[in-house]
Image (cartoon, rainbow, N blue to C red):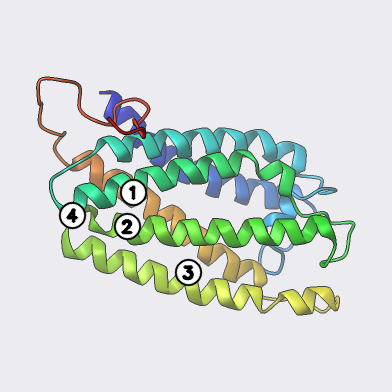
């Protein structure tokens, strides 16, 4: 039961993130869902920042809980190693997301300012972690999930690369008519993958009993024994 609750947190996290993004965009009059970035909604100076920060805090906790659930779902062989690494990376990403409010975009400063440069670096680290999570998690459920995961990685790389090409246009105060669309394809693609990973693992049998609690139910032990 504990394992299932932790895995359900992955579904809740995905739905919460996408739903809050859509709702925040609707609350900001004049915000362009197609042309403006997700980061702007929670950036310093944004009218939706106070609405989003508590939600993103809850999302981060759900993400960490899901990582614990993935860690505790340990079939044999390659899938076990892949899921353990995926769970650890999800926990790390959740902790990084908890620090997100300290590295937010500042809407009142230039793109190349210190604050916004830190935000960009944080974004790069986040994207790399997400790609690693999907790559290691691809072993969760046979060929179909592996191919789906690789296709998701390809989409994220392409749309993420196109989004970064908009940075010079932002710096030059030029229009970026499709930036919001490309960024949301990237983010929503990962959220869909996380949701499907949770559903896939919920359908999988629980780890076999070994006379002691299954490894991973609770905080994983990272110290050598």
Q: Which of 40 and 106 is in front in this view?
A: 106
Specify few, some or many for label 1: CA neighbours under 10 Å numbering under 14, 14-19, or 20 or more.
Answer: some
The reply to whether dot 4 and dot 1 touch (C-beta < 8 Å) is: no
What separation in Å lies between label 4 and label 2 (alpha carbons)?
A: 10 Å
Where is residue 205 drawn, in percent x and y? 13, 37
Sequence order check: which comes first, mark 4 or mark 1? 4
Residue drawn 84% across and 56% down? Answer: 107
**Helix, strand or loop at disc 1?**
helix
Residue that carries the numbered disc 4 in the rendered image: 78
Left or right placement of residue 199 versus residue 180 in this view: left
Q: Is residue 46 above or below residue 187?
A: above
- Does dot 3 land on a helix, a strand or a loop? helix
Circle 2 residues within 10 Å: few <14, some 14–19, many ≥20: many
On residue 85, the disc is 1
What mark, if any, has residue 136 been given in the picture?
2
The mark nearer the N terminus, 1 or 3, is 1
How far apart are the two marked residues, 1 and 3, measured between alpha carbons? 20 Å
Give the label, 3 or 4, closer to the camera: 4
Quadrant position of residue 5 = top left
* 209 left or right of 172 in image: left
Report, in whole angstroms, how far the alpha carbon at label 3 lies from the one at label 4: 24 Å
Question: Marks 3 and 2, Cα distance to the nearest angstrom?
Answer: 15 Å
Residue 204 numbered tag: none
Residue at the disc numbered 3: 156
Q: Do the residues labelled 3 and 4 touch (CB within 8 Å)?
A: no
């Amino acid at each position: 039961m504990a394992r299932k609750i932790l895995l359900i947190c992955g579904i809740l996290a995905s739905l919460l993130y996408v739903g809050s993004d859509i709702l925040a965009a609707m609350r900001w009059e004049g915000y362009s869902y197609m042309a403006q970035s997700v980061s702007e909604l929670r950036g310093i100076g944004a009218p939706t920042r106070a609405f989003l920060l508590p939600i993103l805090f809850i999302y981060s906790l759900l993400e960490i809980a899901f990582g614990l659930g993935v860690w505790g779902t340990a079939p044999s062989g390659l899938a076990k190693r892949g899921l353990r690494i995926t769970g650890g990376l999800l926990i790390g990403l959740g902790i990084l997301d908890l620090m997100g409010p300290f590295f937010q975009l500042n809407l009142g400063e230039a793109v190349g300012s210190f604050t916004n440069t830190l935000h960009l670096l944080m974004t790069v680290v986040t994207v790399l972690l997400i790609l690693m999570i999907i790559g290691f998690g691809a072993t969760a459920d046979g060929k179909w999930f592996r191919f789906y995961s690789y296709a998701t990685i390809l989409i994220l790389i392409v749309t993420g690369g196109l989004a970064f090409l908009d940075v010079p246009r932002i710096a030059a105060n030029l229009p970026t008519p499709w930036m919001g669309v490309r960024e949301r394809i990237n983010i929503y693609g990962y959220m869909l993958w996380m949701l499907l990973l949770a559903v896939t693992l919920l359908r999988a049998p629980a780890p076999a009993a070994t006379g002691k609690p299954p490894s991973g139910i609770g905080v994983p032990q990272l110290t050598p024994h």
